[in-house]
Structure formats: structure tokens, C-alpha cells
Image (cartoon, grey):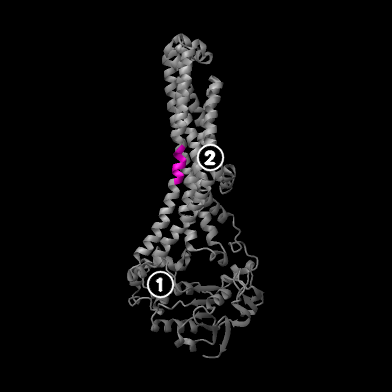
Amino acid sequence: MIFLIIIDLIKLFSIKRKINFVFFIILSFLVGISQMISVGAIMPLVSIYLDPNYIENYTLVSKFISVYANGLHPQFVLTFLFIFFLIFSSILKIFLIYYQSFFAQSVGIDVNKNVMTKILNQSYEEFVKNEYSFYISNLTSKSNLLINNILIQITNLISSFFVFVFFIILLCFVDFFSTLIISSILFISYFLIILKLKKEVKFISDDINFFNNSIVKSIYDALQEFTDIIFYKSHNYFIEAFHKRDFKLRQSNAKIIFFQNLPKVIIETIAISSIIIMMYFSLKIYENKIQDFIPFFSLLIFSSLRLLPSAQQIYSCLISIKGAKSSFNEIVEILNSQNANAPKENNEIFFFNKKIFFHNVSFKYANTRKYIFKNINFEINQGDKIAIVGSNGSGKSTLVELILGLRFPSNGKILIDNTILKKSNIQSWHNNISYIPQNKKISEFKIYESISLGQTELLKDKTKIYNLAKELDLDPNIKNFNFFKEFINRDINSLSGGQVQKISIIRALLRNRKFIVLDESTSAIDNQSEKKIIEYLSKNKNLTLVVVTHNQNFLKKFNKIFKVSNSNLNIINNLK
């Protein structure tokens, strides 16, 4: 299973990150070798400390000293080499940690960008299947889980694996039988623990994934209802809802941490006891030849300082990876999803020049039987000014979504001029439309950023923006151009709800689209300003305007009224 997770993770890497990952593996390999050499030097060093003549038993070391350090005392040479390799190994390890940290965060940057890209490139129908909290959770807490509990743990596992393997090889060369006993004890102990905890960790992984989503949702809900909390004294309700979810998540995390550290004390006790027992029997065997076993046990003890932490790290990484598996799978699912509405080269380009035609259009939501609309037929001609009216829940929003191409008919077809609207040409249709929803506020933006939304070329003609701001009564002091230049550099969250809606209308008009849809986009605007806006938009004969409204006072400004009632559509003409 871990191997499959590693494969899935590597699939998320760009070519550059794959090269980085290969370099990390090579670096981990070198660190493992360097640590083996530095600790491996312990045995000849201790032997020569006990008896300088013992160097003859280490042919390779003896030849090295005779060729490169002839005349120097063997103890001095070996001490120097030991310290040199120890320092070199430490420097290499420091570089590995540095490289691992920045590699992991670089992958995190790539993954988050790709997740954000996938989310924003979904079709509308796919997007609304999940709540905002789902997307926020995947971009924050779950993304951190992927990096900290999956990627970093996999890199730790690889580096610890090399250290573990090289030290087992080293000990096998010195005493195969003793090494076999120690490694078998370690392997069997950890294997049994993992086997025992397998199901429990799987359940905890699902809980962590669920409560990560749930916590973000409780935060989002509380912030959305902040004013209601103030007036209805609902503080405790939202605090308790958040606390319960946070408590359960922390409990799940605590279990994972406990399972990660559980074997450490047990395994270390078993391993150290085994070494002591081996030392005891060795003393009995080599009663008068203490120098024959002290070097080996010195090596064994020093190796244990690397071997036991490496074994524990491997186990801990496995538990951590299993604990984050559900969250990881959710992110992978998003990244592997096929977005039918993703930006791509569009070969079916068309323009809205004559009319929109609904031909026998029926619509129902997925997994439901009830039709919202059934066999409706109507035309919207270029230049039409249309009001959509109806009570709440009557189907107005669904009708607007069909007109906009955010949803597609269950049956029937929608034609733009003579072109059937479909997923392959929807981008071309959206290029003809400006859509202004009821609630539009981007709190972290400056006003000018909210107007442009990244299309900075729209800001070059400040005079045009200034004239629109005056026309729509954006602010009482806007008649002064110097004030206007200062005004658009303010934060968008400094504006009233009505001003924010006016900014949205300015944003739409600057793009010079042929078709504008206002979905209750003037609900927070005063009657006088609303009347002025409707009159201004109605003056443009080439502009096709659709307005969803509850205000009956301005219906005479429209040449068609679409009255939606209980999913029925009644069209009233010529009321202007």
C-alpha cells in the first residue's frame, strides 16, 4: 500500500520535481554510506586504542596508513579519520535536511497551485456539488497533511531506510549471526505492531479527513453568520459546534502520535536487553580476551544509536502516511478529475448577433425525478431588455443558469443564433456575457483590483472608469477626479453593500460584452440609484439585458417579462 501511495505521489510531480526527488534519493544513499563509514571506523579505532599492534588485523587500514600516513601513529591517524568522516557525514546530513525541507515545500506550492487550478476550471455543475469548506480544507489543512504527513514522511522513510540497510550490512560483515538475531527481533516486533494497528489507523485516517472538512465548515458557517450571532446571542452554539469537531480531530491526531511513539520504548528495551545478554555470554566465552569482543560491542552500541532510531523512524513514517491516506486520496481525486470546462483551445468560436432560442428545453437536477422546467420555448433577441420575476424558489435562478450556460438542459437544446450550445463551445458563449450576481465582495482586494480581476489593461482608461463611476453614483464625492484616483486605491471591504454592487456593474460594463445578466444585483442599492442604473443600461439598444428583480417599479423599462411560477414560464411582451 505504501508503495502505491509513493507511486501516486510521484505522479503529482512535475518533471523538475521528479529530478529533485531522484537527487534526494541519491543524497540519502550517500548519507547512509557516510554514516556507515564513520561509525564503522569505531571498531578498528577501539581495537588499536586497546592494543596498537592490533592494526595488523585490519589489512585495509594498515595499507592506508603505510601508503598515506607513514610515520604517523596509527591511533592518531584513525582518530583523525574518524572525526573527519563524522564531520563530513554530519555536513552531508545537514544538507540533506535542508534539501528535503525546500523540496517538500516546493512540491506543496506546485500541488496547491494545481489543486486551485482544478477547482477553478471545473464546470459550474461540478463546482456546486461541493461546499466552499471542502475546497478551503483541501487547499489548507489537507494540503499541509499531504506535505507534512505524506511527502516529508516518505522522504524520511527513504533516508532512514538507507541508514538502516547500510548499518545492517556493516554489522553482517562483522558478526552475521548476532546481526541476524537483532534485525529479526526488530523486524518481527514492528511488523506485529503494524499488523495489529492496521485497521485502527485506517479508521483514524478517515476521521482526520472528515473532521478537517468539518472544522473548516464550522468556521466558515460561523463567520458567515457573524451578525446573527451578535443579535441572537448564538455564540455558544457556534463555539460548541467548532469545539466538538476540533476536539475529535485532536483526539484522532493524538492517537496517531501515540501509535507512532508506542513501540519506541518497547523496542529499545528489547534491543538493549538483547545487547546486554549478548555481552554477558561473550564475557563468559572470552574471559581472558576482553579486547576480542569490546571493539565489536563498541561498534554494536554506536550502530544501535543509528539503527534503532532509523527503525523507529521507518515505523513512525508508515503510521503517519497511513493516517493521512484518506486526505491524500481526496487531493489526488481532485487533481485526477477530468474537467470538461477546463480552459483549452476552442475550435467552435461563435458570436451572439441575433437571438438566443430555447427549443423544447426541459431540466431536472441529477438524481432527481422532478423537472424544474419541461418543454419550454422562447427567444431572446439581441437588444431585448428582459425582467425575470417570481417568488423565491420558483425557478428563476435555474432559468438564469440555463441562459448563462452554467447548466445544460436535460432534454431539448439552446441555440445561440444557429449554434447549439454545448460543453465544447461554452467558453465562446461566456465570452459574450457579463454576469453580476447578488453578492459580490472580494475583501482582500483594492477597488481597482476588484474592477480588473487581473486584466490590468482595463485600468489604462481611467477616464472611462471615472465616467461610469459618476454615471452610477458610486460615491457622492466621485465628481472630483483626484478624489476618484484616491478612492479606487481603497480596500473593497471599506465600501457599503450597494457600492460593492455598483463596482460589479462597472466591472461588467468595462468589458463591453453584448449580453449582461443582473441576478438581483441591485438589491442593496437605493431606489434612486437603481432607477438610474436600469435607465442607463436600457438606453443601449445593442445591449441585451436580463435582470432578475423583485422590484415592480421598473418593469415598464423592459420589453419582455419572464414570469416564473412553480417552474412554469409565462412570457409577457410589449410592456414598455
Q: Which segment did they paint magenta?
A: 255-262
**Residue at the image point whose x is 43% and y is 34% from the top:** 265
State how far apart marks 2 and 1 are (Cα): 56 Å
For this orientation, the residue located farthest to the bottom is 575
Name the residue that disc number 1 marks: 500
**Residue at the image point whose x is 47% and y is 42% from the top:** 259
Q: Is residue 267 visible?
A: yes
Q: Are marks 2 and 1 in contact (CB under 8 Å)?
A: no
Indicate which disc, 2 or 1, sits on the residue closer to the N terminus: 2
Place of residue 103 in the rendered image (x, y in percent of width and height, measured from the top left): 49, 43
Q: Secondary structure at mark 2?
A: helix
Q: Is residue 355 left or right of residue 548?
A: right
Pair 2/1: label in front:
2
Place of residue 559 in the rendered image (x, y in percent of width and height, measured from the top left): 54, 87
Q: Secondary structure at mark 1?
A: helix
Place of residue 367 in the rendered image (x, y in percent of width and height, measured from the top left): 61, 68
Please rate how many residues cluster around mark 2, counting C-alpha atoms within 10 Å: few if below 14, some from 14 to 19, many from 20: some
Of residues 576 and 478, the one drawn nearer to the viewer in this rendering: 576
Name the residue that disc number 2 marks: 194
Report the quarter where the N terminus lies.
Answer: top right
